[in-house]
Image (cartoon, rainbow, N blue to C red):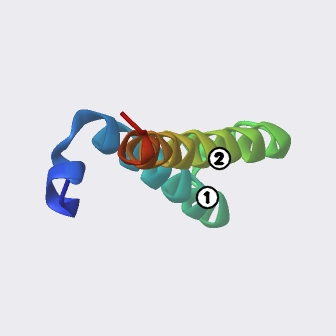
């Protein structure tokens, strides 16, 4: 599956958007935007970390499943 087809896939779009939102939230933490700054620092760190980890975990899960499918013996 080519990279462009993967990016168009719904799972990859969801995981990429979660990861990008996590990085964007980390950027907003440094800028002290009021709507995001109202949360405590601990909760902000937990939210950002979870979004990034979930996003990359979805990508990693799909990649390992694809390689396992290719290595199965009939």
Quarter of image, res 27? bottom right
Which residue is disc 1 drawn over?
A: 26
Quarter of image, res 3? bottom left
Q: Residue at x 43, y 49 (%)?
A: 67
- Spatial separation of the CA atoms under disc 1 and disc 2: 6 Å
Establish if 74 lies above or below 41: above
Which residue is disc 2 drawn over?
A: 48
Q: Quadrant of the C terminus?
A: top left
Q: Horizontal placement of 60 versus 67: left or right?
A: right
Establish if 55 lies above or below 32: above
Q: Residue at x 58, y 49 (%)?
A: 52
Q: Where is residue 25 shown, x and y percent of the image?
A: 55, 52
**Between 60 and 54, the one nearer to me in the picture:** 60
Q: Where is residue 68 shown, x and y percent of the image?
A: 46, 43
Q: Characterize the local packing of mark 1: few (<14), some (14-19) or many (20 or more) Cα atoms within 10 angstroms.
A: some
Element at badge 1? helix
Of labels 1 and 2, earlier in sequence is 1
Q: Do labels 1 and 2 touch, CB within 8 Å?
A: yes
Q: Where is residue 46 shown, x and y percent of the image?
A: 76, 40
Element at badge 2? helix
Q: Characterize the local packing of mark 2: few (<14), some (14-19) or many (20 or more) Cα atoms within 10 angstroms.
A: some
**Between 38 and 47, the one nearer to me in the picture:** 47
Q: Horizontal placement of 42 versus 73: left or right?
A: right
């Amino acid at each position: 599956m080519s990279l462009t087809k993967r990016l168009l896939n719904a799972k990859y779009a969801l995981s990429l958007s979660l990861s990008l939102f996590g990085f964007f939230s980390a950027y907003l933490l440094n800028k002290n935007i009021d709507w995001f700054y109202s949360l405590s620092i601990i909760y902000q760190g937990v939210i950002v970390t979870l979004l990034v980890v979930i996003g990359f975990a979805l990508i990693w899960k799909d990649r390992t499943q694809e390689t396992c499918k290719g290595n199965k013996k009939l």
